[in-house]
Amino acid sequence: MAVVDQTTPTGFNPGVRNTAAGLSILGAIIGGVIVGLLLFAPAQALLGVERVADPISLSLLAAGVVFMLLGGIIVVARLGLGGAIALIGVLFWLVGCIVFKSFSWVLFAPVLLAFLGALTGMIANDQLASGADSRLIYRQSGLTRLTHWVWAFAMFFLLLSGLQIFNARPNLYIGLQSGFGFENSILDIYATNGPNGPAGQTKLFGQIFDTSGVFGMSGSKEHPVFTAMPGWATIPSYRDLGTGRVVHFFFAWILVGTLAIWLIQAIASGHFWRDIVLKPRDIRGLPKDIIDHIRLRFTHGKSYTPLQKVAYFGVFVIAFPLIILTGLTMSPGMDAAWPWLTDVFGGRQTARTIHFITMLAFVLFFVVHIIMVVLAGPINELRSMITGYYKTNVGHGSSGEEH
C-alpha cells in the first residue's frame, strides 16, 4: 500500500510546535469539560448523548484527557514523543466512546483536535529527523496513509455487519438454488437440543462439530442466545438485519470509492506496476524471502520484498475485485442490470459462499499482517503509516543506491 521513493514534503512553518501543542491541549480541555458534564450534570446536557455514562466509560474518557494534555505539554520540547502520547490519549478516548456506545459529534470534537495535534507533532519530528539520518526516508504518501486507515476502518464494520447479515441465513450453498429440498450446503450453523440441553453445532462439509458458547448458541446456560454468530461479533450486537444491511452497504461504498481513488493514483504514479504487479524476478526471489521471514530476518528497504508483493498482489488484484463482484452478484438490482454476473459465479448462492470465503481470507491476511508488523518492528512500521517516514536497514553507496 506504499508509494515509495517520493520527494520529502515541504517543511512546516515555525509555529508547528505551538500548533501541535495548541490542538492537543484544546482537545484535552474540551474533553475535560465533557467528562465533567457526564459526571456531574444530567446526560441530556450534552447534545447527542441521551444516557448516563458508566464508570468504565468515564475512566477511559478521563484517561484520554490526561494523555492528550500531557502530550500537548511535552510536544513543546519533544515533538515526536509528545505527539505519540497525545495519540495514546486519542485511542483511550475512542475506546471510551466504544464502551459508552456513543459517537455523537460532541464526543468526536476532542478526539479530532488531539489527533490533528498528535499528527502534526509526529510528522514534523520525523521530517526534521530525516535530515540528519539518511536511513529515514519518506515512504508513504498522505493519500496512501489515508486510504490505508479508511480501508481498515471500513473492513472492520463490513466484517461485523456482514456477520449480522449472515445470522439471518447461517448457511452457505454451492449452486443456483438453496432450501430444505436441496442437499448442496457446505456450512450450517444452528442450535439443537442435545442430551445435556441446548447446544450449538456447526456442520462443515458433512462433519458436525460442537461449537456451543461461540457458534450456534452463545451466552450463559441461564440466558442462552440462539444465533449463529455471538453478539460481540456483530453490528448491531442484537438481531437487527435492517441496520446490519444499512451499515454494510454504507461502508461497502466507502471501500469501493476509496479503492477507486487509490487505484487511479497508483496507476498514474507507476506504483501499481512497480510495487503491486508480480514480475519474474519476484517469483525467483520468493523462496529466499520466505526463508528469511521464517528466520525472522526482515529487510527494511525502499521497495517491497517478493513475499510482500505476492501478498499485496493477492489483495488488490484478486481479493478486492472478487469480494466486490460477488457482493454485487447478490444484489437483485445488479442481477437485473448485469445478469451475466450470476453466470460468472455459478449463481447467487455460490457467489454468497465465495463472498464469505474471501472475507475469511481477508481476516487471515489481517492476522498475518499484524504479526509481521510486530515481528518486523511495530514502531517503525506504524510510524510509516502515521507520518509517512520509514527507517531502512540497508546501506547506501556514494551513488545513493542500495547494496
Image: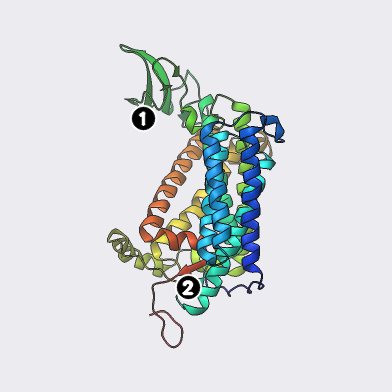
The image shows residue 358 at horizontal and vertical percentages of: 47, 43
**Considering the numbered disc 2 on the image, is that residue within a helix, a strand or a loop?**
strand
Please name the residue that numbered disc 2 is placed on: 136
The image shows residue 234 at horizontal and vertical percentages of: 52, 32
Can residue 386 be seen at all in this image of the molecule?
no
Q: Which of 167 and 119 is in front in this view?
A: 119
Q: Which residue type carries mark 1?
A: Phe
| Quadrant in which residue 142 is drawn | bottom right
The residue at 49%/79% (across/down) is 132
- Determine the residue located farthest toward the front in the rendered image: 40
Q: Is residue 368 above or below residue 136?
A: above
The image shows residue 193 at horizontal and vertical percentages of: 37, 12
Q: Give the quarter of the figure containing the C terminus.
A: bottom left
Q: Nearer the viewer, residue 287 or 25?
A: 25
Q: Which residue type carries mark 2?
A: Leu
The image shows residue 243 at horizontal and vertical percentages of: 63, 30
The residue at 48%/31% (across/down) is 232
Say the numbered circle drawn on residue 205. Answer: 1
